[in-house]
Image: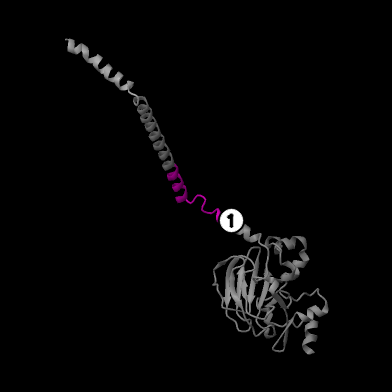
C-alpha cells in the first residue's frame, strides 16, 4: 500500500529534478522552436507547390502565351526607317530617286540609261565611299516575301512591313535570307553587288521603299516612323482625287517598272534622243 502512494510522488520528483537542471529549460525552448520552425517550413512548401501547380495549369492552357507577339508588331511599326547600310556616314548615293517635282538637272541625274532606253530611278543606288563591298542590312523589321536571282537587276530581296510597305534590295550578292524569314531591323541580308541595269554605279545596292506598290522617295522619309506613313485609305480621306489618279491603271506602276521605258515623259524622250 505504501509503495502505491509513493509512485505519484516519485514521478513528480523526477520531473522536478529534471527542471532543476541548468540546461533543462533552454533545451525545452530549443526543441519547441525547432518544432515551430519545422511546421512553418512545411506550410510554406505546401503553399509554393500549390502555386506552382496553378501556374503550370495556366501555361498549359495557353494563358499569356501571346503577350510577346503584339509587342513585336508595335515596336516594328514604331521603328524609324534607316538606310540599308551599317554606317550611313561611309555611304554615298550614286543615283538619286527620280522626283518629278525636282529641278531639271536633278531629274536628269536620276534617269537610268540601259539598252537604248531611259527609265526613272524608283529608289536610291547606294555605294561605299571607297567603292568596296559592304553589308546590306534590313531598313526595317519585317518578313521576307521574295528572293529572286536576276542578272539585270543584280538579284533581289523584298521584305514586307506594316501599313502596306515593302522594302526592296537589288544589285546584291551572297544573300543571307530566304522567303518566310522574319528579319529584324539592322540584320545583314546580303552584300552589295553589281547589276547590268546600272553598271556605272559599280558595287552598290539599289534600295526602294514602296507603299501599296507606289514608289516613295527614301530621302524624304529616312528617320520617319513606319507608323507615320499614310495608308492609301488615309490618303483617300484627305485627298480623294490624288488617290484616284494613283489607282488609274494607266498611271499604276508595275513591280518591274525599272526595266520599262515610259514613253509619255517628254523629258525622258528628249534625253534619249540626245
User: Please, which residue is most extreme toward the top here?
Assistant: 1
**Bounds of the magenta segment:** 51-69
Rendered residue at 78%/66% (across/down): 241
x, y percent for residue 8: 24, 15
Q: Is 55 inside the magenta-drawn segment? A: yes
Looking at the picture, how far across and down is residue 272, in whole percent?
77, 87
Q: Main secondary structure of the magenta part?
A: helix
Q: Quadrant of residue 18?
A: top left
Quadrant including the C terminus: bottom right
The residue that mark 1 highlights is: 70
The N terminus sits in image quarter: top left
Residue sitting at x 73%, y 72%: 248
Q: Quadrant of the rendered structure where residue 230 is?
A: bottom right
Residue 138 seen by the camera: yes
Residue visible at 76% across and 64% down in the picture: 240
Colour scheme of the rendered structure: one colour
Amino acid at each position: 500500500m505504501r509503495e502505491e502512494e509513493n509512485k505519484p510522488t516519485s514521478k513528480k520528483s523526477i520531473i522536478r529534478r529534471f527542471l532543476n537542471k541548468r540546461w533543462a529549460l533552454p533545451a525545452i525552448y530549443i526543441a519547441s522552436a525547432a518544432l515551430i520552425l519545422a511546421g512553418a517550413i512545411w506550410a510554406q512548401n505546401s503553399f509554393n507547390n500549390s502555386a506552382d501547380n496553378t501556374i503550370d495549369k495556366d501555361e498549359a492552357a495557353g494563358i499569356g502565351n501571346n503577350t510577346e507577339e503584339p509587342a513585336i508588331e508595335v515596336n516594328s511599326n514604331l521603328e524609324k526607317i534607316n538606310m540599308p547600310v551599317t554606317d550611313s556616314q561611309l555611304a554615298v548615293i550614286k543615283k538619286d530617286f527620280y522626283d518629278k517635282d525636282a529641278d531639271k538637272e536633278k531629274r536628269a541625274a536620276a534617269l537610268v540609261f540601259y539598252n537604248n532606253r531611259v527609265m526613272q530611278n524608283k529608289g536610291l543606288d547606294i555605294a561605299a565611299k571607297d567603292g568596296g563591298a559592304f553589308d546590306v542590312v534590313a531598313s526595317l523589321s519585317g518578313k521576307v516575301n521574295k528572293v529572286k536571282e536576276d542578272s539585270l537587276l543584280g538579284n533581289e530581296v523584298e521584305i514586307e512591313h506594316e501599313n502596306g510597305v515593302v522594302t526592296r534590295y537589288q544589285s546584291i550578292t551572297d544573300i543571307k535570307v530566304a522567303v518566310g524569314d522574319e528579319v529584324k531591323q539592322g540584320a545583314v541580308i546580303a552584300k552589295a553587288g553589281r547589276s547590268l541595269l546600272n553598271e556605272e554605279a559599280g558595287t552598290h545596292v539599289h534600295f526602294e521603299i514602296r507603299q501599296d506598290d507606289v514608289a516613295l522617295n527614301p530621302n524624304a522619309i529616312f528617320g520617319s516612323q513606319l507608323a507615320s506613313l499614310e495608308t492609301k485609305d488615309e490618303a483617300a480621306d484627305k485627298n480623294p482625287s490624288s488617290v484616284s489618279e494613283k489607282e488609274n491603271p494607266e498611271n499604276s506602276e508595275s513591280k518591274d517598272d525599272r526595266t520599262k521605258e515610259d514613253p509619255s515623259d517628254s523629258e525622258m524622250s528628249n534625253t534619249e534622243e540626245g
